[in-house]
Image (tube, rainbow, N blue to C red):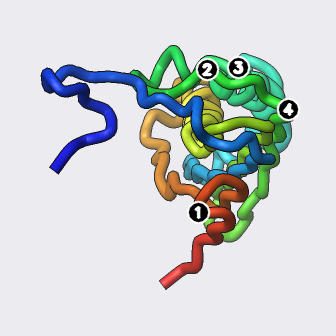
Amino acid sequence: MSFTHFNKQGHGQMINVSDKEVTSRKAVAQAVITPNKETYQAILDQRLKKGDVLAVAQIGGIMAVKKTSELIPMAHPLILNGINIEFEMLDESHSIRIMCTVRCEGKTGVEMEALTGASVCALTIYDMAKSMDPSMRIDQIFLLEKEGGKSNHYVRHET
């Protein structure tokens, strides 16, 4: 058995994608952060001392997407066409669902970029609100959808 990210000597390598076709790529990933009810409301009302938590988190997520190849050892640097981060406020569970969509025209997918963006966005919310609620939970980090490339279209279906 040969591994794609190891060379013949058993050392790490970034795979060669030069023979792959350039296709339109898209990935959507999510993360969910759950603060306590008081902190959730303070985030919504922009009452935290550090300012607009979601605006800062959105920028943090975008910056993280652009830095993915510096964080994930074998990720290729990509020219990105677009990054969008959206928030869904889940009042019943006082959670914030973060969805990060990344697009490019390239030879490799943008799943890691979308996952990194959603994760760092959640971490930024944690950082901005941790003085009020250090017990916040970050979970449900996963790929929701991907398009493009050899395997083409994937949509996560809950089981």
**Label located before the other in sequence (3 or 4):** 3
Identify the residue under disc 2.
77
Q: CA distance from mark 4 to mark 1?
A: 21 Å
- Give the amino acid at mark 3: Met
- At x 83%, y 28%, the residue is 55
Residue 96 visible at all: no
The secondary element bearing badge 2 is classed as: loop
Depth order, front residue of 42/62: 62
Q: Position of residue 30 (x, y in %)?
A: 63, 53
Q: CA distance from mark 2 to mark 1?
A: 21 Å
Q: CA distance from mark 2 to mark 4?
A: 13 Å
Identify the residue under disc 4.
81
Q: CA distance from mark 3 to mark 2?
A: 14 Å
Identify the residue under disc 1.
151
- Give the amino acid at mark 2: Pro
| Quadrant in the rendering for residue 148 | bottom right
Q: CA distance from mark 1 to mark 3?
A: 28 Å
Identify the residue under disc 3.
63
Q: Nearer the viewer, mark 4 or mark 1?
A: 1
| Quadrant in the rendering for residue 154 | bottom right
Q: CA distance from mark 3 to mark 4?
A: 14 Å
- Give the amino acid at mark 4: Asn
- At x 14%, y 21%, the residue is 9
